[in-house]
Image (cartoon, rainbow, N blue to C red):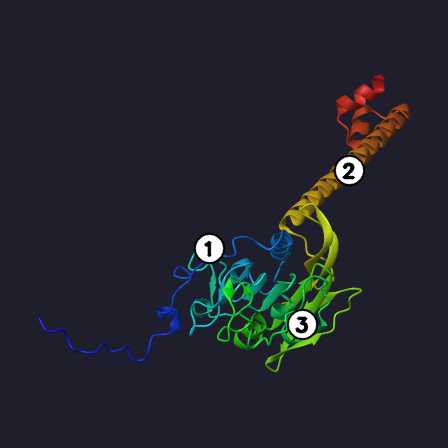
Amino acid sequence: MQPSTSAIVPPDPPLPPWQTLPTMYDLPSEALEEPGLPDEFHDLQPQLLSRTLRLSQYATGQFFTGSDLNLYYDSAHPQWYKRPDWFLSVDVPRLYQGDLRRSYVIWQERRAPFVVVEFLSPGTEKEDLGPYAESATAPLGTILQTDPLLPTTAQPVNGQALDEKTPAKWTVYEQILRVPYYIVFSRYTDTLRFFQLVGGHYQEQSVDQERPRLWLPELNIGLGLWQGEFEGISRLWLRWYDAQDAWIGTDTEQALEQAEQALERAEQERCAKEQALQRANQAEAQIQQVARNLLQAGSSIAQVSQLTGLAEDQVKQLQAE
């Protein structure tokens, strides 16, 4: 049998990428050469960010937060990814088609992150800060002297070796994904840096290092450095605050606060009932004294009952005392 010479005719118009390219089920969810998190801080800090996030404009099912999750960003290179330490996407469902996400695939989600947070680690300043790396103050590691548009192949980052074809993290966030807010925090120096996308490029915004707080007006929420204890560790943490400039509690803290408020309300109600009972007893004693006075003045039991509202049996008992 002669092989068919008929050509496969592509669909017209071409199918969109979310129907033809790999989905999160087809792409790796982790890097084998990167089996664990850099340190415990990279585990705890994202938890605090997610657990204190409250968005007034979005229901809990209308946004997604990810940490150390493969973020596939280029439909022309489906295997390329970055692993943000923490990111927030809004106007996306909490679950992907009812399932927990294995990764975040831009051509499937069709929403880039709105906020990305990176934690500086020794030797990652250039990858995290791009052209601003020379002004970084992290004491550990030497800043890599590479162009962020042409990253080096010497050190793998986010589980993949960088080469001239793979853009660096800064370039991906700024020029490909165009993430509106990019935040970098160094736990080694407790330095918070804040970059906002302006005219297609990141511009560093002023941060008061004495009271480091950042306000994100589109989300009606702010992010700042909070000194406190989380999961038994006391230090400076990144944490969300509300429009009243108050730190937002975690789910556990809010449940504890609600329980304390419920106990306080119950105690107030108990005190109010005791006070009401005391007033009632005082009123009853006053009525009984009036009844005694009327009896001593010669009033009949029926008259005293009618005037005081006491039953005749009660009046008789008072008369017998």
Residue type at mark 3 is Ala
Secondary structure found at label 3: helix
Secondary structure found at label 2: helix
Secondary structure found at label 1: loop
Which mark, by number, is residue 301? Answer: none
Q: Position of residue 81 (x, y in %)?
A: 49, 66
Gap in angstroms between the C-alphas marked 3 and 1 = 35 Å
Which residue is labeled 2 in the image? Answer: 271
- Which of the 4 image quadrants contains residue 220? bottom right
Q: Residue furthest left?
A: 1
Which mark, by number, is residue 100? Answer: 1
Q: Residue furthest top?
A: 320
- The mark total stands at 3
Within-10-Å neighbours for mark 3: few <14, some 14–19, many 20+: some
Gap in angstroms between the C-alphas marked 2 and 3 = 62 Å
**Nearer to us: label 2 or label 3:** 3
Residue type at mark 2 is Cys
Residue under the image location 73 percent in, 63 percent down: 139
Which of the two discs, 2 and 1, labels the residue nearer the N terminus?
1
Residue type at mark 1 is Leu
